[in-house]
Amino acid sequence: MSTYLVTGGAGFIGSHLCEALLKDGHTVVNADNFSDTYDYRFKVRNVLETLGMSPAFDYREKDEDLSRLRSLVRSERYRLEIADIRDGSAVEALFRTHKPDAVVHLAAMPGVRASIADPLLFEDVNVRGTLQLLERMRAHGVRKWVCASSSSVYGNNRKIPFAEADPVEQPISLYAATKRSCELMAYTYSHLFGIDGMVLRFFTVYGERQRPDLAIRKFAERIERGEPIPFYGDGSTSRDYTYVADIVRGIRSAIRYVERHEDVCEIVNLGGNRTVSLARMVETLEKEWGAQAKLDRQPMQPGDVERTCADLTKAKKLLGYEPSTGFEEGIRKFAAWLKAELAWQRTEK
Ligand code: NAD
């Protein structure tokens, strides 16, 4: 069994990954700063759910809450560290204290539109933070890692589906540019210091515990409340949506791959295998909620790509990756979770 340092393990994807690694019998160190991208209380819930604990928590003030949470969840095989990956001494302490065998780096400032509003913050966390991590890995002889990138690096490429060897030199958002930078740094650290890595380009992930700023969740909550949803463009933009359990399976296979191989640095797409238009995504949500969405039609937003579609040939070849959850099925699971979540939130108020 191994010890994994998971950065961003309190987030949407990270909490599912930590849960899966714990189930496999590994030890997990979750390093997360509970950034203010969205309400930290969602992340507290994620951590509690990771460990199968009750979501009830006596919220008072953020710092105090996090310190109580840290003590509450402490166990032999799970450690929560409230740490910012930009803070060199905090990252150093993570490696010195926990001596991880490998790193799964998911912490980031996510979101295309937010990156256009605050590019310096995105550069700071996604580029400098990743570099801090790589530097500490180098110093402590940790030679295996998996890192999250994004389908947004493909920009508005015309060739469909997007394959890893396609040109990615024209990112159309700062977020995409920072993710591409992570891919390049992964290569540099593999070449110079023998750090074996796999960088995974996730294609729009959805499912239980989805980030509240992501379209599917935002739209679903508004349909439930009878509020209008922002509907960008004519509805023909499309996304390759990936159910979170498929992504987690892909990440676990990527970990195994880097553990079993030497001198590797690969970039691999993890997608859902089918492209769904914005209009169809809304229809699917309407069906689940038995209600018609009110559309607040708006122009396409700068930085948004027109479509994403993953070529999964490489993922299948290297990782045996095959997403198994279709969009309707995934949305059914997501809806069941969100309805229960919203009902719970109402009783808490
Ligand atoms: P998330 O925001 O739920 O999780 C990211 C976590 O990182 C959060 O818990 C946050 O608190 C933490 N974090 C942010 N800044 C940090 C810092 N400076 N130090 C320590 N922790 C910090 O997002 P997610 O959707 O779970 O995304 C996980 C990863 O996958 C990210 O790298 C994201 O860019 C990437 N990704 C996500 C999607 C998607 O559709 N969700 C698609 C492509 C790529």
Image: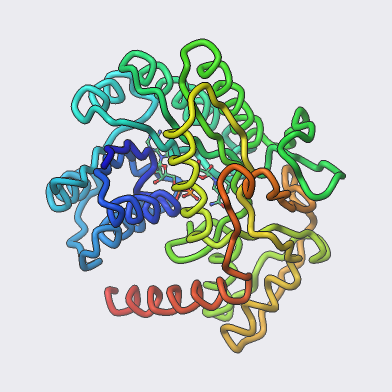
At x 28% / y 31%, what residue is drawn?
100
Among the 4 quarters of the image, the one containing residue 123 = top right
Outermost residue toward the right in this view: 158
Position in image of residue 313 (x %, y %): 70, 48
Figure check: 178 above or below 283: above
At x 37% / y 80%, what residue is drawn?
343
Position in image of residue 155 (x %, y %): 76, 40
Outermost residue toward the bottom in this view: 290
Position in image of residue 234 (x %, y %): 83, 65
At x 79% / y 50%, what residue is drawn?
161
Among the 4 quarters of the image, the one containing residue 228 = bottom right
Horizontal side of 244 relative to 201 (left or right) equals left
Figure check: 250 above or below 246: above
Position in image of residue 24 (x %, y %): 30, 53
Horizontal side of 132 relative to 51 (left or right) equals right
Assign the C terminus to one quadrant of the image: bottom left
Please name whichever residue, 141 or 229, is drawn nearer the observer in this view of the structure. Answer: 141
Assign the N terminus to one quadrant of the image: top left
* Image mark count: 0
Please name whichever residue, 250 or 302, is drawn nearer the observer in this view of the structure. Answer: 250
At x 29% / y 58%, what residue is drawn?
50
- Looking at the image, what colour scheme do you see? rainbow
Horizontal side of 56 relative to 104 (left or right) equals left
